Image (cartoon, rainbow, N blue to C red):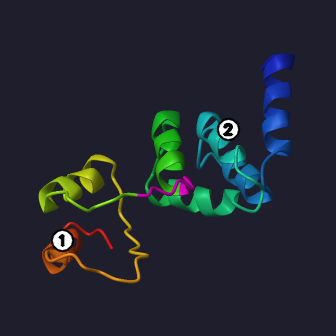
Amino acid sequence: MNEFSISKLLTLVLSSHEIISTILSNGETNHAVTVIIASFKLNEQPKFLEIILDRRISSPEDASKLKVKFFSKTIYAIGYQGEKSIDFIKVFQNNEIKVLIDIRRYHPCKCREEVINILLNLSIY
């Protein structure tokens, strides 16, 4: 191992939670995935590591996709008035949205029950 590689590994270990460093040292994950884990705040790293280990993720590509999917703080706002139920449902499917929060006070939609049942059947809550 050359000096540059040692320096990179040392930087990685120092920016990681103690648990992450231990797992890396034990060979339970690899350097590429550990770099992605280390991109989180120290207090978030153990949670992400647990998901990585549970899903047996070893490629940095899969770890990056997981990071985006599970730790995105994106909130979408969507209007429904005048849309067909199926078109509304497709928005959720096409964007892999799994949670819907209806914040309206008044729900005048005639097809509300139909839409709710379809969303629940698709595991959108």
Q: Nearer the viewer, mark 2 or mark 1?
A: 1
Which residue in the structure is indicated by mark 1?
Answer: 115
Residue 74 image point, x, y percent: 53, 53
Residue at 59% over, 57% down: 48
Out of 23 and 52, give the one closest to the viewer.
52
Contact flag, marks 2 and 1 (Cβ < 8 Å) = no
Q: Is residue 109 left or right of residue 48?
A: left
Out of 124 and 107, give the one closest to the viewer.
107
User: Which quadrant is home to the C terminus?
Assistant: bottom left
- The image quadrant that residue 81 belongs to is bottom left
Q: How many marks?
A: 2
**Mainly helix, strand or loop, the magenta region?**
loop
Residue at 57% over, 62% down: 50
Which residue in the structure is indicated by mark 2?
Answer: 35
What secondary structure is marked by label 1? Answer: helix
Which is nearer the N-term, disc 2 or disc 1? 2
What secondary structure is marked by label 2? Answer: helix
Residue at 45% over, 55% down: 76
Instruction: Indicate yes or no whether the magenta region holds residue 69.
Output: no
Residue at 27% over, 61% down: 80
**6 to 54, vertically: above or below:** above
Three-letter residue code for mark 1: Val
Magenta stretch in the rendered image? 71-77
Q: Is residue 10 left or right of residue 32?
A: right
Residue 1 image point, x, y percent: 77, 20
Residue 23 image point, x, y percent: 67, 53
Q: Is residue 124 left or right of residue 101?
A: left
The CA span between labels 2 and 1 is: 42 Å
Q: Is residue 58 visible?
A: no
Out of 77 and 81, give the one closest to the viewer.
81
Quick one: label 1, few (<14), some, or many (20+) residues within 10 Å?
A: some
